[in-house]
Amino acid sequence: MAANMGHTAPDDDWLGKLDEAILEPDLAIIDPHHHLWLRNGYTYLMPELALDLASGHNIVATVFAECHSMYRQTGPEAERSLGETEFVRGQAAMSAGGQFGATRACEVMFGNVDMTLGGNVKTLLESHVEASAGRFHGVRFSAGWDAHEAINNVAPSPKMLVDDRVMAAARVLSGMNLSLDTWAYHPQLDDVGELADAVPDLRIILNHVGTPILGGPYRGRGEEVFADWRARIIRLGERPNIYIKLGALPIRMPGFEGDRGLPPSSEEVAAAWKPWIETCIEAFGPSRSMFESNFPVQKRWCSYQVCWNAFKRLAGGASPSEKQELFAGAAATAYNMQL
């Protein structure tokens, strides 16, 4: 999500007022980024996910994205995230039973471990792989940090991606054939490149188009932010071990003058995201670019149906083989999925 946008969250009924015909309904899709949680009274578990998956798009499989869900409440602090992995294993088993449709939901996952454990992280990673029954295919390290007090920092300091301990843990991931998702803000993107250079055999997946910050101290500086972000994204695209996720941008950018009382159409979403998405595909190519739903976070701004229709509009000029990569192939490669 672009940082600090200040949107209010409409309810699902508001989104449901807009019903679109599904574009290219047979196109196979792997959704490489969604969450499941019980949080602040909001439930998004397998039944809720299944309703979105049944919206008409051909979602063949999904990847669960860590979100601090269902952690263990007792035991060593470093092991508490095993609770999320155990939870996802159960949700995946429910999906595999077929009662929630044909999609292989949570076919694989990426979880959370303390990357500051450095080389000592291996035992913990092995525990996650075992607890997941083999579905644990990677880790996410959230490194977002900005010096301005208005920005919500998710890391304790600005240079965590190139911290020696994190670098050591990244080498362990590479040796175990696990991937590393990273969520960083756009001024930090050169650190992602430094990590990629230091661990060239590690598959790194950059979340949310590199999270351009458009609020706080950056508000009103959209053209400047875009130019800076674009230059950094193009440099990252030169590293063959980095993949990028396409999505999780604000639909209604600062300065939007339309009717905010209506849910956005896929045409509106595609128009808002076009310069960002096209830049990413130009830099990384279709084989290292993957569309992501980021549900249920994105559900605050558009429906699952509209979200994937927008992606299909954005890929309208791509060849069939390029679409296969953008919608499924890149995700399958990045997450070592055997489908």
Image (cartoon, rainbow, N blue to C red):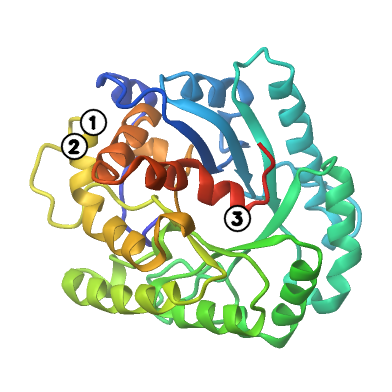
Name the residue nearer the viewer: 117 or 217: 117
The residue tagged 3 is 334
Q: Quadrant of the N terminus?
A: bottom left
Q: Nearer the viewer, residue 176 or 26?
A: 26
Residue 208 occupies quadrant: bottom left
Give the residue type that dot 3 points to. Answer: Ala
Disc 2 marks which residue?
267
Q: Amino acid at mark 1?
A: Pro
- Where residue 288 appears, as percent x and y from the top left, is 48, 59
Image coordinates for residue 211, horizontal then vertical, percent:
40, 64
Residue at position x 80%, y 69% from top?
Answer: 175
- Decide if residue 182 is on the left or right side of residue 95: left
Could one spot residue 293 in this view of the protein? no
| Left or right, residue 176 beside residue 20 | right
Which residue corresponds to mark 1? Answer: 263
Q: Secondary structure at mark 3?
A: helix
Amino acid type, residue under disc 2 in the picture: Glu
What label sits on residue 233 in the rendered view? none
Using residue 202 as the reference point, say whether residue 172 is left or right of it: right
Residue 82 appears anywhere in the view: yes
Q: Position of residue 277 (x, y in %)?
A: 31, 56
Residue 101, x across and y down, in percent? 60, 16
Residue depicted at x 77% and y 44% = 85
Q: CA distance from mark 2 to mark 1?
A: 12 Å
Question: How far separated are the C-alphas under marks 3 and 1?
Answer: 33 Å
The mark that comes first in sequence, 2 or 3, is: 2
**Spatial CA span between label 2 and label 3:** 29 Å
Tell me if label 2 and label 1 are in contact, CB under 8 Å.
Answer: no
- Label 1 element class: loop
Classed neighbour count for the residue bearing mark 1: other residues with Cα under 10 Å, few (<14), some (14–19), many (≥20)? some
